[in-house]
Image: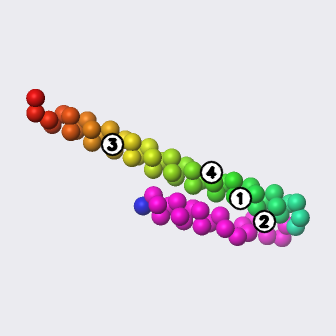
Amino acid sequence: MYLIWVIAGAATGSGTPEECRGRTGDSLKLCEDASDVGTTIGVGLVIALWAAVDIILGFTYVVCRLANRRA
């Protein structure tokens, strides 16, 4: 599921955003660059959430295994 979010988020960053249409020159370049930075931050947050959930699930698994082992 996270992989789908990452792919979909990265795919939305391609092309010229609607907010940038009608701009020219440096204004267009600045608008497109800002959009790319926003896309990068969004994808990075999804990856960070993915890693955090994996770590939490891993610790939960270890704790449950240790709690159920025989002495």
Tag 3 and tag 4, C-beta contact below 8 Å:
no
Identity, as a three-letter code, of the amino acid under mark 3: Gly
Q: Nearer the viewer, mark 3 or mark 1?
A: 3
Q: Dot 2: what SS?
A: helix
Q: Please name the residue that numbered disc 4 is placed on.
A: 41
- Residue 40 in sight in this render: yes
The relative height of residue 66 versus residue 23 in the rendered view (above or below) is above
Question: Can you give x and y, in whole percent of width and height, for residue 28 in the image?
Answer: 83, 63
Q: Return the residue found at the far front.
A: 71
| Apparent side of residue 54 relative to residue 45 in the rendered image (left or right) | left
Mark 3 → mark 1, Cα distance in angstroms: 35 Å
Tag 3 and tag 1, C-beta contact below 8 Å:
no
Q: Quadrant of the N terminus?
A: bottom left
Tag 4 and tag 1, C-beta contact below 8 Å:
no
Mark 4 → mark 1, Cα distance in angstroms: 10 Å
Q: Dot 3: what SS?
A: helix
Q: Please name the residue that numbered disc 2 is placed on.
A: 20
Residue positioned 40% across, 46% down in the render: 53
Mark 4 → mark 2, Cα distance in angstroms: 19 Å
Magenta residues span 2-23
Residue positioned 26% across, 35% down in the render: 63
- Residue 35: numbered disc: 1
Residue positioned 54% across, 65% down in the render: 8
Q: Dot 1: what SS?
A: helix
Q: Which of marks 4 and 3 precedes in the sequence?
A: 4
Tag 2 and tag 1, C-beta contact below 8 Å:
yes
Mark 3 → mark 4, Cα distance in angstroms: 25 Å
Q: Which of marks 2 and 4 precedes in the sequence?
A: 2
